[in-house]
Image: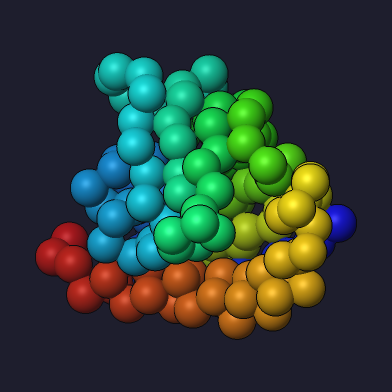
Amino acid sequence: MLKYGSQVEIDRPPADVFRYLVEPAKQALWSDVPMTRLTEGEMRTGSRFEVSFGKGPLKATLGIELAEVVPGSLMAWKSYSGPIDWQGEYRLEALEGGGCRLSQAGKLEFHGMWRLLEPMAGREIESGEIKELEKLKSIAESAPE
């Protein structure tokens, strides 16, 4: 099982940053994981979407369900289909001065032949997850208020 976690401070209020987590067009600006929505309307607890990892024959598609959404502070999810069990969350915490701390944590458990890729995926997750948060920080801070 792989576990990850990282955090970044962003000079924007939590409500502004939260939109980059739950609005697909904004999420696509900073995340390299393509997301396809399966449910209509606002992203909320129970919403479902698919994400894809890898390329060619090593491509996995996971069904993801939002386990808990608290606007401005939490987005948690879990997979319901695919070769990887994934649970994760983003948390936003207001900081003095109007900014926020965005933290992420999660765990992945690979099944079947995908278990062979776990060591390589672990290295990618270690470097990739913080890069995504730093990209989100840059985009959110450069957006007009």
Residue 44 seen in the current view = no
Q: Is residue 111 above or below residue 28?
A: above
Residue 75 placed where, x, y %?
55, 40
From this viewpoint, which residue is outermost toward the right? 1
Residue at the front extreme? 57
Q: Is residue 45 visible?
A: yes
Compared across the picture, whether 82 is left or right of 98 comes to: right
Residue for point 72% across, 66% down: 117
Residue depicted at 37% across the width and 23% down the height: 38
- Scheme of image coloration: rainbow
Tell me which residue sits at (57%, 70%) in the image.
129
Q: Is residue 55 above or below residue 22?
A: below
Q: Residue 27, percent across and down?
A: 33, 52
- Measuring from the top left, give residue 12's x and y in whole percent: 36, 64
Q: Quadrant of residue 17?
A: bottom left
In this rendering, the answer to whether 75 lies above or below 43 is below
**Front one among 103 and 121:** 121
Q: Position of residue 16 (x, y in %)?
A: 32, 52
Q: Which quadrant does the C terminus fall into?
A: bottom left
The residue shown at (54%, 48%) is 60
* 5 and 70: which is toward the camera: 5
Question: Which image quarter is the N terminus in?
Answer: bottom right
Give the side of residue 104 with respect to residue 131, left or right: right
In the rendered view, tell whether residue 95 sits above or below residue 44.
Answer: below
Q: How many marks?
A: 0
Q: Is residue 83 left or right of residue 135?
A: right
Q: Is residue 107 left or right of residue 92?
A: right
